[in-house]
Image (tube, helix red, strand yellow):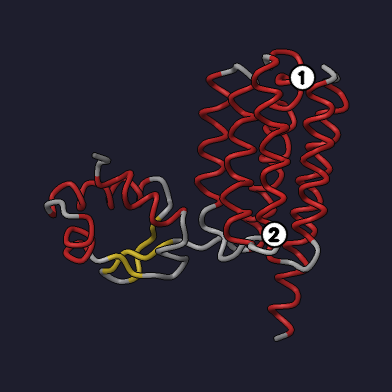
Amino acid sequence: MKDAYSLILAAIESGTYRPGDRLVESELAERFGVSRTPVREALQRLETQQMLVRDGRSLIVASLDHNQLAELYTVRAELEALAARLAARHATPEEVRVLAQMVADDQKAVGNPEALARANKRFHHQIHLASHNRYLVQQLDLVHRSMALMARTSLAAEGRSETALAEHKRIVDAIAAGDGAAADRALRQHISMAWETRLKLEAAADRD
């Protein structure tokens, strides 16, 4: 059974709890069927990791402002590109086939942003693992944990699902060819397009 920390973190990552939502110790204990002590410890840990922030006496799920988003995408682009470059060098034939199959399978999720967002996370994590660098995987886990604080997925933008999957295919093709430079470029372009799409979504939200 997962511990309280893992359960609450998974609920944030899945969107059950979204930025601005208040987390109540007693409600969480009841929801997950655990005692209040491990819930309290989990909330303290999540606050230390800046996944939760104080609002008076309450703890709420943190949100990211524009500057924090920009910083996060900058770090993500550098680390993800490194992972792709290392994957082109170290990925096994089996890992490459798994990545290619993921791209093919994810076509079924086009039109379902939430399902595609989950698939997107699995795809990127597979690239991280294919880098065969445990320290890089750990750092990317932290980056992707922070990404759970985004209020919505950029894959919800019109046409983004199709273009994102095409970008995924270019990344896998470069990794399969053992071309680290091409894998690096393809991954950077993918993150750049995701960031540009998010900027457009934020601008549209501001107009509304």
Helix, strand or loop status at disc 1:
helix
Side of 191 where 131 appears, left or right: left
Side of 115 where 84 appears, left or right: right
Helix, strand or loop status at disc 2:
helix
**Residue drawn at x 27%, y 41% as measured from the top left:** 2
Q: Residues within 10 Å of mark 1 (few under 14, many from 20)?
A: many
Q: CA distance from mark 1 to mark 2?
A: 26 Å
Q: Residues within 10 Å of mark 2 (few under 14, many from 20)?
A: many
38 versus 126 height, above or below? below
Q: Quadrant of residue 23 in the image?
A: bottom left
Query: Which quadrant does the C terminus fall into?
Result: bottom right
Side of 199 where 8 appears, left or right: left
x then y, percent, for residue 196: 80, 58
x then y, percent, for residue 180: 82, 21
Q: Quadrant of residue 155 in the image?
A: bottom right
Side of 192 where 50 appears, left or right: left
**Residue drawn at x 21%, y 66% as measured from the top left:** 27
x then y, percent, for residue 195: 75, 55
Q: Which mark is residue 59?
A: none
Q: What residue type is disc 1 on? A: Ala
Q: Which mark is residue 155?
A: 2
Q: What residue type is disc 2 on? A: Leu
Q: Which residue in the structure is indicated by mark 1?
A: 88
Closest to the observer, 145 or 55: 145
The disc, 1 or 2, on the residue closer to the chain's N-terminal end is 1
Q: Determine the residue located farthest toward the bottom in the rendered image.
A: 208
